[in-house]
Image (cartoon, rainbow, N blue to C red):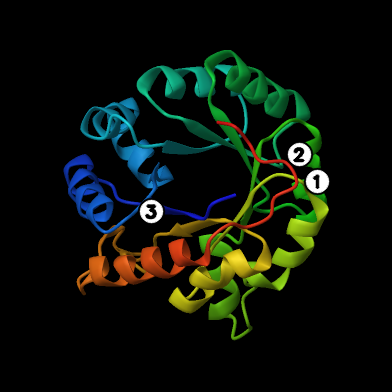
């Protein structure tokens, strides 16, 4: 699978998200993600706004669905999303409902293992229930809380190879990665590189970073795209 770079628009204002996305597309971003803060702040307007501005770009709706799976996925698909996110800790019927909506509407279903007791088992469960992508995710609160206690927070790279080996669908790693770590994830077998807080989004304000985020993003896009193909056992179509 060809490597892809996805920017997570973890912002709370649609105009700012659109401006950030516009800049990101110019430096080589492949996929746009309507982050959870953006969806909470702007609702379906966020998805519609991104789709109107970027008619041919894949858009991930990071709903983190835990219930009402079919309806949530359906609403996002009808608004223009090409991918939705369901949690490994959701009931299996919820995951199955999201997968069914994915089939019915022709969108990709990404399963997120955040908070699962065994991250590897969570990834396996999501694939077994029909998810076409795995998000290996260490949460924002978890990282900050553990760091505040003076301990080393977990990093997605700790188990990324095990996650990739355990499933046959494309994997992406999310949560507290440095720039170099994000760029390195294809070498672990994860072709989908996600960029957001804290690299280009201020993770305390959930606003655009005050440095030059697009220079950082261009470097990431250039290096990730130069990596080439990453072997994936079963490449998702959506």
Q: Residue furthest top?
A: 104
In the picture provided, is 90 more to the left or to the right than 75? right
Q: Is residue 121 above or below residue 189?
A: above
Q: Are marks 1 and 2 in contact (CB under 8 Å)?
A: yes
Secondary structure beneath dot 2 equals helix
Secondary structure beneath dot 3 equals strand
Report the Cα–Cα distance between label 1 and label 2: 5 Å
Residue 101, percent across and down? 59, 18
Mark 2, residue position: 127
Which disc, if any, is residue 159? Answer: none
In the picture provided, is 124 more to the left or to the right than 225? right
Q: Is residue 144 visible?
A: no
Residue found 21% across the figure and 43% down from its top = 18
Mark 2 or mark 3: name the one nearer the start of the chain: 3
Residue 126, percent across and down? 74, 39
In the picture provided, is 206 more to the left or to the right than 113? left
Mark 3, residue position: 7
Residue 99, percent across and down? 66, 24
Report the Cα–Cα distance between label 3 and label 1: 25 Å
Which disc, if any, is residue 124? Answer: 1
* Front position in the image: 106 or 225: 225
Task: Give the quarter of the image for residue 85.
Answer: top right
Q: Is residue 52 above or below residue 30?
A: above
Q: Is the C terminus in the top left, top right, bottom left or bottom right quadrant?
A: top right
Q: Residues within 10 Å of mark 1 (few under 14, many from 20)?
A: many
Report the Cα–Cα distance between label 2 and label 3: 24 Å
Residue found 52% across the figure and 66% down from its top = 227
């Amino acid at each position: 699978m060809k490597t892809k770079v996805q920017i997570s628009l973890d912002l709370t204002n649609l105009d700012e998200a659109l401006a950030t996305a516009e800049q990101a597309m110019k430096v080589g971003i492949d996929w746009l993600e309507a982050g959870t803060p953006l969806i909470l702040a702007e609702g379906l307007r966020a998805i519609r706004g991104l789709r109107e501005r970027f008619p041919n770009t894949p858009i991930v709706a990071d709903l983190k669905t835990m219930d009402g799976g079919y309806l949530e996925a359906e609403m996002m698909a009808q608004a223009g999303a090409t991918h939705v996110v369901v949690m490994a800790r959701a009931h299996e019927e919820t995951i199955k409902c999201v997968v069914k909506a994915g089939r019915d509407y022709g969108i990709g279903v990404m399963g997120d293992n955040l908070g699962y007791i065994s991250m590897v088992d969570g990834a396996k469960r999501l694939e077994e229930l029909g998810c076409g992508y795995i998000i290996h995710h260490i949460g924002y609160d978890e990282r900050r809380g553990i760091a505040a206690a003076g301990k080393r927070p977990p990093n997605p790279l700790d188990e990324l190879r095990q996650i990739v080996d355990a499933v046959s669908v494309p994997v992406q790693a999310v949560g507290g990665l440095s720039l170099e770590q994000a760029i390195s994830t294809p070498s672990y077998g994860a072709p989908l590189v996600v960029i957001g807080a804290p690299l280009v989004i201020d993770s305390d304000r959930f606003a655009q970073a005050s440095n030059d985020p697009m220079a950082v993003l261009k470097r990431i896009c250039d290096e990730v795209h130069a990596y080439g193909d990453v072997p994936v056992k079963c490449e998702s179509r959506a």
